[in-house]
Each structure stands twice: as structure tokens, then as C-alpha cells.
Amino acid sequence: MYIKDRAALGNRNRTTFTRLMLVAIGALWMLAAGFIGRADAHAELVGTSPVAGSQSDASPQEVRLVFNERLDSGGAKLQVLDESSSNVAKGKLSYIEEGKGLTVALPKLGEGHYTVSYSVISADGHPISGAYVFTVGDPAPLTDARELDPHSQVGHGHNHPGASEGLTIESFLHYASRVLYYAGLLSLSGLLLWSLHRQASPLVRRVREHAIGLAGKFALVATLTYVFFSLKDLAEDEPLSEWGRILTETTIGRLYIAELLMALAALLLTRFAPIARLFWIAIALFIESWSGHAVVYEPIGYSVGLDFVHLLAASLWSGGLVLLLAVWLRERPEAGRFALLFSKWALLAFLALWVTGILSTLRFLPSIAYLQYTKWGSWLIVKAALSLLVAVTAFLIRLRLRKGDLPRGALLKADIGLLCAIVVTIGVLTYQTPLPANKPLSYHQMGTDMHFTLRISPNAPGDNEFKLKIWLPLSIGEGKAKRVQLRLLPHDKSEVGYIDVPLEPYTDEELDAFPDFVKSTYTAKGPFMPFAGEWTAQVRVTDAADTEYVKETTFRNY
């Protein structure tokens, strides 16, 4: 009897213990679930000013962000980036809305697209980051390769000579005519500049005036050749009436007429007084500055002015070097005396060339890294390397002059050879575009669980049209997506988070069906890529079974 009672008591104790364990496990599970629920409820951005995607005529006075939870008192970052990805918000961050928001004052903003990038920590220790775009005014598109193409300026879409089929005879003649034109322009302008030196010896004067006469004739022939091949290229094998339209109705055509008139006047330069020669130099170099890439960039006065000074310095060096060689062939001692004067001015000319060249390059390109993206950048690097060789040659010549020796013929010939090489690079360089051409993105990826197509046009900084197509299996929720998200992440600005693109459904008429898959189509339009660089487009799709698919593609715009 005692044994039975003891066994029954043991069974009751085990049952009570088991129940207590189940209650404890249940309580722990509910407690853990509560913690998990709170952990998932991260702080979210609930209000912005300016509103994401908004466009206003006036510059906002501040950027204001409000979250649904209180923020940690430290570690917050808030930047407002302009179209060149520079931070324009230099004010101090302030907490608002009882610690749930941030604000930063803004200076007066000009027209453009601005990116708000934020990174904060909520009071419960969770990081939150993101970005969005707002627009001030009605900004014009950024300068791109299309604006630098002379064919588009006259109403044609032709590529540059040799761009697609390689170096043909026609493209070679076109480039050769440009080289001859620049050789004539720089040498004649430079000789005229040196004619302003009134203390030159009689021999130098005779040699200089003879060289000016020859350079004037050469410049006329070179300009005629250059204009002929340029018009032939721009007219795209159209009848002569198209040549007349280009010459009379387009800016570049009127500049060709001005160049021809200046070339005709060059035949009379030996009879011109010094002031008239100076006037010819100013007009000829201004015409060339206005016909180049510089006129596309704002402010025009600054970019054209840099180009003018660059050409003036190049003329001073080129003309002086031609004159030095001509005098050296006539009388070596006189060449030595002229070389002392020339070397001083050549140094100043080279300093001006380097300063204006660097400033122009920085004006044309968003960054030095763009030199690797185009043929223009490659030729500019070649030109810079040749200029360094010229500097070395000039140093060796100057060293001999300081010792009282005459410059060696080999050094002078090397200097002339480098001048010719630089003129060749200029002839090629001026017909290349500094900026790469933006091409619309069209990306398609197949998969066992999902296919998708992403198109972005024109794929340039600023306003773009986005089209996203999703194909999901018919067997899962009849191929319907519960959520579709398109996010853009700039690689060149690591502190900027994903920019969400607000998608809307649209009806697509393209015949691109896949068996057992259902297509969904979405579109958006706006400045969600506000600055140039390398981007990652991330597509996030959640199907009817709550399975999320994340696909990415990387691309670049300029």
C-alpha cells in the first residue's frame, strides 16, 4: 500500500513539473516573440521636407526629416548633394520633433536636382539610411557628348570620321586637313606676334617677314582644304545646296566663312602695320576659340577665354620656334642671340599652356578619371607627354645657351619635330568629344524563378524614364507579385544610400511572353539619378508565397 501511494505521488510530481516546464517555455516563447516583434519594428522615415520627388520654383530654406521613433543623440549624418555630388548643406544638424527628426539649413540653391542622403541610429540602436531627390526650378540637362558633336549642330546624326569603320582614306584626309589648318594658324599667328618685337636685328626681321609671307600662303591653302573636307563631312554626301545651308544658316558654317576671310587677308599681312597684325591675331584666334568645345560650357566667357589664351601661348611658342630654326639656317650666331630671347618667352608660354590646359580640362570633365573613358582623353595624355618632352628639350637648349654655346641643330630639329607632333595631336584632339556618349540601358536576365527586364532612357544624369518588366511563374499565386521595388545605388558616393524609384503599373504592348510565366510591367519618370557615375540597379520582388527575389545590375552614365 505504501509503495503504491509513493508511486502515485511521484507520478503527480512529474506531471506538475512537466506542466510548469510547459508554462515556462510558453512564457519564454511569448517574451522572445515580443522582443522579435519590437526588433523588427525599426524606425522609419515618415515625413520629408522638401517632399521626395518634388519640384519647386523657390529654393527651400532647410531639409527636414521626421521618423516614427526617437533617434539616438549622436552619429547622425545628413547631406544635400548637388548635380556634381558636392555637399551644399554646411549648416549644423538640429534635432526636432522631440528627438524624432533632423533638420539642416540650406543656402540659396540654384536650379538643379538635389539628393538628400541620411544616416541615423534609432534610440533602440538600429541604423537607418537612405536617400531621395528633389528639384529646384526647371534645370537644363547637363552637357553631354551630343552637344559637342558638330553633326548634331547642323541637323545630322553622322558619327565622327572613322568612328565606326576605322581609319579610312576619307577620314585620314579630314584629319590631315585639320592638322595643316592648325599648323598654319599657330605658326602664322606666332610669327606675327614676334613681329611686334621692334628691337630685332635686321637679319631676324628679313627672315621673319619672308616667313610671314610663306606662312600666309600656307594658311590660305590649309584653310581652304580644311573647310572643304569639313563641309563634305558635315553635309553627308548631300547636294551642294546643303553646303550652302550649312554655311549660311548654322553657327559653325558662319565661322567657316570667317576663317576663309581671315585666310584671304593673311596674303596681305606683310603690308600690315603692327596694330593691324595684332588685330588679325585677335580675330583669328577668337574665331577658332568660338568654334571649339569651349563654347558649349557655361559661362561661355570663361571657357572661351581659356581657349583663347591657350591658343595665344601656343602661337607664341610655335612661331618663335619656326623663326628660330629659320634664323639658325641663315646665321648661327644670330640664332644664338635670338634663342636667348625666345627661351624666356617660351617658358612663359609653356606655363600659360599648362595652366589653361588644366583649367580647360577640369571645365570640360567632371573629374580627371574621365580621361580614361574617351579617345579625347587618350590624345590629351599624349599631348601632355609630348609637352614634357618639349620642356626637357628646352631645358637642354637653355643649358647650352648659359654656357655660351650655340644650340645644337639636333636639339632644334627635335624641338621642331615635337612641335609637329603636338600639332598633329591638336588636329585629332579637337575633333574628338571630351565626354563619353550616354547610351540607354536595356538589361534582361533570365531565371528559373523570375525573369526581368530593366530599361533606362536616356541613362543620363537628371530626368530619366524607367521601365521594369517582371515575369513570375503562373504556378505561384497566378504569377502575381505582392511587391515590386526598384532601387538605385551610386558607387562613387559611398555615403549615399539607395534611392527608391516610385513605380507605377502600365500597360505594355510588346510581344515578349514566356510559357508558364505571367508578365507585370511598371514605369517611372524623374531625376532619380541626379549625378553621373557608376550605379547599381537593384530589383526586389516578393511573390504570392512571400518569397523575395533580389536581382542587380551595374551600369555607368556620364
Image (cartoon, rainbow, N blue to C red):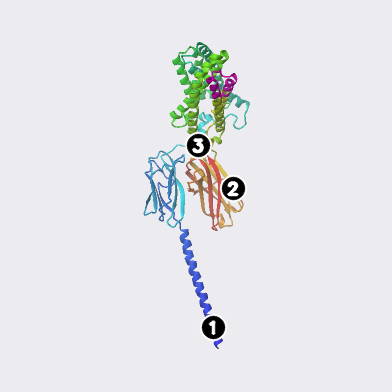
Type of amino acid under label 2: Gln
Type of amino acid under label 3: Ser
- Which residue in the protein does label 1 denote? 8
- Which residue in the protein does label 3 denote? 367
The quarter of the picture where the N terminus appears is bottom right
Total residue callouts: 3
Q: Main secondary structure of the magenta part?
A: helix
Of callouts 3 and 1, the N-terminal one: 1
Which of label 2 and label 3 is nearer to you?
A: 3
What residue range appears in magenta? 393-418
Assess whether residue 403 is covered by the magenta stretch. Answer: yes
- 315 is higher (above) or lower (below) than 488: above
Type of amino acid under label 1: Ala
Of callouts 2 and 3, the N-terminal one: 3
Q: Which residue is drawn at 59% across and 48% down?
A: 445
- Which residue in the protein does label 2 denote? 445
Q: Which of 248 and 542 is in front in this view?
A: 542
| Mark 1, secondary structure of its residue | helix
